Amino acid sequence: MAMYESDFTRFMNEFLEKNPHIDEERRRFRLTWWDKKVDLDEQKRFNAAKVKQKPYVYQPE
């Protein structure tokens, strides 16, 4: 029994087979934006420095 494969999945698989450089770029860009080490002390300072938002921001003081 064959597994169902949508038209989009089939299209993407064929596209990536014809353009292997796209997958390499995707991996490189992922490393640029997502796979970063998180500095917990810096994140703690960032969260502590936030200013609490008023319940209704458009209300004049």
Image (cartoon, helix red, strand yellow):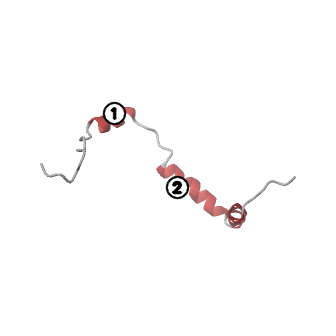
Q: Which residue is painted at 25% across and 45% down in the image?
A: 55
Residue 58 or residue 17, whichever sits in front: 58
Tag 1 residue: 44
1 to the left or right of 52: right
**Percent position of residue 11, x then y:** 70, 66
Residue 53 or residue 21, whichever sits in front: 53
Q: Quadrant of residue 41?
A: top left
**Percent position of residue 36, x then y:** 47, 43
Q: Dot 1: within a 10 Å radius of its alpha carbon, few (fewer than 14), some, or many (20 or more) residues?
A: few
Query: Tag 2 or tag 1, which sits nearer the N-term?
Result: 2
- The disc at residue 29 is 2
SS category of the residue bearing label 2? helix
42 to the left or right of 53: right
Residue 7 or residue 48, whichever sits in front: 7
SS category of the residue bearing label 1? helix
**Percent position of residue 12, x then y:** 68, 63
Q: Is residue 1 shown above or below 12?
A: above
Q: Which residue is painted at 87% across and 52% down in the image?
A: 1
6 to the left or right of 50: right
Q: Is residue 31 shown above or below 49?
A: below
> How far is disc 1 from disc 2 in space, using C-alphas?
27 Å
